[in-house]
Image (tube, rainbow, N blue to C red):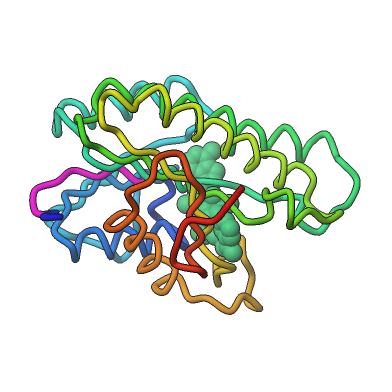
Amino acid sequence: MNTANKNAVITGANSGIGLALTHKLLAEGYNVFGTSRSGRIDDLHHDNLRVIRLDITDRNSVNAATAEINTTAKKIDLLINNAGVAPDVFAEEPEIGAFMETFSTNVYGTVFFTETVLPILNSGAQVIFISSNMSLPRNMATNGPAYRMSKAAINVYAMMLAQRLENQHIRVTPVHPGWVQTRLGGDQAPYTTERSAEGIFKAIQTNEENGKFWNVMAGSIEPY
Ligand SMILES: NC(=O)c1ccc[n+]([C@@H]2O[C@H](COP(=O)([O-])OP(=O)(O)OC[C@H]3O[C@@H](n4cnc5c(N)ncnc54)[C@H](OP(=O)(O)O)[C@@H]3O)[C@@H](O)[C@H]2O)c1
């Protein structure tokens, strides 16, 4: 795929996996709309990068960000829904505050940001959701109730969206990025953000399935 002059939107581009993906997409020739809550991405300046202020849980912020993207780009070829939180990964019992934060970001924010961007997706575009293998039934365990359930909900949304957008030739893929050294993943994680970004980019470049779960560690689709 020739990626020169293609337009990508990536949420949470200021940190962790999102920042590494932003570097990777710029290196591959994309024009990148990288979002951050502060409206800044420190230490990254590039002619093909436009930083957009966005809090995906805030309707006004979502509308303003999408309008700004639309004014500049008209059409988007790649949407990467990367922004996410995981406040309860070490907890076993559901806690209301953690559920509210996790579902408003990982589910409500992600779903309604995606819906707002859909009208400006090109035919042939791709939508990637950074999910987690913690959401898969065969990996179920007792920790992280809100986090696991939120990513399972996103897998379901991805499968539904894949069917809705099929006749526009838009491919939708939930991706497990590996266990990655980030604020969210912690220092013990085995994967660097660069390695994860390479793996996610391989999914973008090579995956021809629609609505299926891609595992960066396996480098392929795997069953839900
Ligand atoms: N690291 C792992 O091992 C791992 C494994 C599986 C899945 N994931 C997924 O990978 C994605 C990226 O996480 P990461 O590991 O790179 O962690 P990270 O460094 O903490 O990055 C999370 C990003 O999401 C942004 N974000 C959070 N809430 C937001 C909101 N309401 N609106 C807009 N942006 C928001 C953060 O912005 P601020 O900087 O403003 O907080 C930050 O840019 C997440 O969806 C996570 O669930 C990570």
Q: How many marks?
A: 0
Residue in the image at 25% along x and 37% along y: 125
Q: In front here: 183 or 177?
A: 177
Name the side, left or right, on which 122 lies relative to 105: left
Residue 170 lies within the magenta run: no
- Residue 84, horizontal then vertical, whole percent: 56, 46
Residue in the image at 22% along x and 46% along y: 50
- Residue 75, horizontal then vertical, whole percent: 17, 31
Name the side, left or right, on which 102 lies relative to 18: right
Does the rendering let one see residue 25?
Answer: yes
Q: In front here: 221 or 124?
A: 221
Q: Which residue range is magenta in the image? A: 4-10
- Residue 206, horizontal then vertical, whole percent: 29, 58
Residue in the image at 75% along x and 42% along y: 146
Does the rendering let one see residue 61?
Answer: no
- Residue 151, horizontal then vertical, whole percent: 63, 43
